[in-house]
């Protein structure tokens, strides 16, 4: 799908999606107006399938005098045709900064979609024919003094009760472990997902109270892991084993050294048998540690946000989306270029996924080196499923006829790769250089730093500059009242027109997106811009969104 909207600051077309969710509808968010008054706004929006045909979509936009919802109750407007808004006197209207909507994407082909322009590739995978896998759940619930604050424990109990009612199936097993100053305070299970067992578990949850002692996060994780690994050993190969940690505070009892906590958990689960999913209350839980643990143990972490939906609903939504229905586990994607495999594939985003939940897809992006042979790209995906280990194969030949699509391919790659690299960089305090090197493969193998994390951040910065991506804490955009690029400071790396501080001009041709780096690898010109109307299949481009975010600070 492609969402076309003009970049308010440069007049370029950009494609922006908040996230991909293959379950009836895809929700999207598109930057509409900046965080300051402007004289005029021009906005175009189309939604198309991969063949370029219009797709039904709805969007939430109702500004009297500009565009009003077609339904009397003001619900999102349903459309198939393109939307064009030209607002020459924008200052007099209360315009939203973001337009939200949704569309139905349909199903991906069974073996996925693979696009390459010969230098960049994107791979999307979500087979529609998979049956859900049975699951072993180990819930580790914080019952320390940190959970006495406000409604934290009650919200967690409400969410866990809902999960037991609606998500646990008869073929699943589950255990509930609480912790305070001990790794295990109270314990229920394990039990099957039968009606009687579920009722008994809900009664156990209802009686839980928070203590007045600190939390022993270290022992809670280790004891939970031992229980989860035991359940995995007693289960068939087609069962996914998942530990879910819900934390309200920092480690304040037992081992409190955060690096040692992360190391010990990784050492106990080095083979990746147990997938760790962590949820923490923003502002009180140690989210940096929880994210590092999830990253090292093939899982996902998420904060419970203040000021959003109520706490219980956030927890429920997270659990339902991430582990509500698991179609595959231990998903591994490998790439080769051409039958001779002489072409190098490098700089890929995540290629190993702990689980694939129904409603999500596998997305891998990467770069391809030069080749003097067959330029085709091959993808092999392997995963554990309900019916054993399965393999899917897919190949694609380069599409070199669409320069705008090539540009967006790289910008999509740059955004995802930067996000991946910075997540590892943030966790580097817990990982150490040796472990970090085993988890991250950089695009070039020329890191001479003793601290490998510096090279990780350097690659993220290089990609941000090449892709014109604004990233909090990494890059920024400064606009000045001059038609030519001007640097406000000697160390400025990004200018108004995308050139570098040394005055290097952007490439004149939109068709020439690639340059050659000093080490012989292909890079993309940071000065290239997309034409005003472009097409791309399921690409992300967040530059405009980040620009708005920067203006807010």
Image (cartoon, helix red, strand yellow):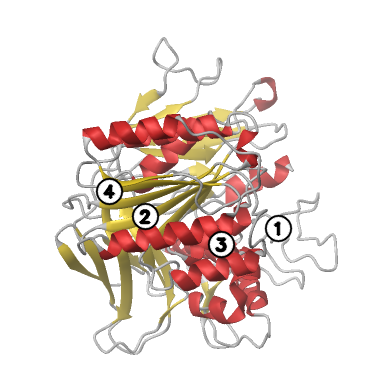
Asked if the residue at tag 4 contacts the one at tag 3, i.e. Cβ–Cβ closer than 8 Å, the answer is no
Give whichever of 92, 537 is nearer the camera: 537
Asked if the residue at tag 3 contacts the one at tag 1, i.e. Cβ–Cβ closer than 8 Å, the answer is no
Give whichever of 286, 352 is nearer the camera: 286
For this view, does 93 lie left or right of residue 159? right
The local secondary structure at tag 1 comes to: loop
Residue at image mark 3 = 292
Give whichever of 261, 294 is nearer the camera: 261
| Above or below: residue 476 compared with residue 75 | below
Nearest to the eye among marks 4 and 2: give it: 4
Q: Earlier in the sequence, mark 3 or mark 4?
A: 4
Nearest to the eye among marks 3 and 4: give it: 4
Q: Position of residue 203 (x, y in %)?
A: 37, 30
**Label annotation for residue 439:** none
Residue at image mark 2 = 242
Give whichever of 98, 448 is nearer the camera: 448
For this view, does 261 lie left or right of residue 522? right
Query: Separation of disc 1 and disc 3 at Cα?
Result: 19 Å
Nearest to the eye among marks 2 and 1: give it: 2
Q: Earlier in the sequence, mark 1 or mark 4?
A: 4
Q: Earlier in the sequence, mark 4 or mark 2?
A: 4
**Label annotation for residue 173:** 4
Determine if residue 181 is in view. Answer: yes
Query: Separation of disc 2 and disc 3 at Cα?
Result: 17 Å
Q: Position of residue 224 (x, y in %)?
A: 44, 56
Rendering quarter of residue 505: bottom right
Residue at image mark 1 = 473
The local secondary structure at tag 3 comes to: helix
């Amino acid at each position: 799908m492609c969402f076309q909207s003009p970049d308010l600051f440069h007049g370029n077309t950009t494609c922006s999606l908040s996230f991909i969710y293959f379950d009836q509808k895809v929700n999207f968010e598109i930057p509409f107006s900046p965080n300051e008054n402007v004289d005029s706004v021009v906005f175009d929006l189309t939604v198309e399938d991969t063949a370029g045909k219009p797709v039904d979509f709805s969007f939430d936009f109702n500004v009297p005098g500009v565009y009003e919802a077609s339904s009397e109750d003001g619900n999102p407007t349903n459309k198939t045709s393109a939307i064009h808004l030209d607002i020459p006197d924008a200052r007099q209207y209360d315009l939203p900064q973001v337009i939200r909507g949704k569309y139905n994407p349909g199903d991906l082909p069974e073996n996925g979609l693979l696009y390459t322009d010969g230098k960049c590739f994107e791979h999307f995978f979500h087979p529609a024919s998979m049956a859900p896998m049975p699951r072993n759940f180990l819930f580790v619930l914080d019952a320390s003094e940190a959970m006495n604050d406000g409604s934290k424990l009650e919200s967690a109990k409400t969410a866990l009760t809902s999960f037991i009612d609606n998500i646990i199936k008869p073929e699943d097993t589950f255990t509930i472990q609480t912790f305070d100053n001990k790794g295990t305070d109270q314990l229920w299970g394990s039990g099957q997902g039968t009606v009687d067992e579920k009722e008994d578990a809900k009664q156990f949850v209802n009686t839980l109270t928070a203590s007045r002692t600190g939390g022993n996060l270290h022992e809670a994780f280790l004891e939970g892991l031992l229980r989860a690994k035991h359940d995995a050993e007693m289960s068939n190969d087609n069962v996914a084993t998942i530990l879910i940690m819900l934390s309200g505070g920092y480690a304040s009892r037992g081992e409190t050294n955060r690096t040692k906590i992360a190391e010990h958990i990784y050492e106990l689960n080095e083979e990746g048998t147990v997938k760790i999913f962590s949820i923490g209350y923003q502002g009180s839980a140690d989210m940096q540690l929880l994210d590092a643990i999830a990253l090292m143990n093939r899982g996902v972490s998420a904060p419970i946000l203040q000021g959003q939906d109520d706490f219980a609903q956030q927890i429920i939504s997270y659990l339902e989306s991430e582990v509500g229905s698991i179609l595959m586990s231990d998903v591994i994607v490998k790439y080769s270029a051409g039958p001779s495999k002489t072409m190098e594939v490098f700089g890929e985003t995540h290629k190993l996924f702990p689980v694939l939940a129904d409603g999500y897809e596998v997305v891998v992006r990467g770069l391809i080196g030069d080749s003097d042979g067959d330029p085709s790209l091959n993808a092999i995906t392997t995963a554990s499923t309900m019916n054993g280990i399965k393999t899917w194969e897919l190949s694609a030949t380069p599409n070199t006829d669409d320069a705008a699509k090539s540009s967006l391919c790289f910008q999509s790659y740059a955004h995802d790769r930067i996000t991946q690299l910075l997540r590892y960089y943030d966790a580097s305090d817990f990982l150490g250089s040796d472990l970090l090197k085993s988890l991250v493969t950089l695009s070039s193998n020329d890191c001479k730093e003793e601290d490998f994390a510096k090279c990780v951040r350097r690659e993220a910065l290089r990609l941000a500059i090449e892709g014109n991506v604004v990233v909090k804490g990494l890059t920024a955009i400064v606009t000045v009242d001059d038609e030519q690029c001007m640097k406000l400071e000697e160390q400025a790396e990004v200018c108004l027109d995308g050139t570098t501080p040394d005055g290097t001009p952007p490439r004149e041709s939109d068709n020439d997106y690639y340059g050659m780096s000093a080490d012989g690898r292909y890079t993309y010109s940071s000065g290239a811009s997309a034409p005003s109307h472009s097409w791309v299949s399921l690409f992300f481009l967040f530059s405009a969104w980040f620009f708005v975010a920067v203006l807010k600070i």
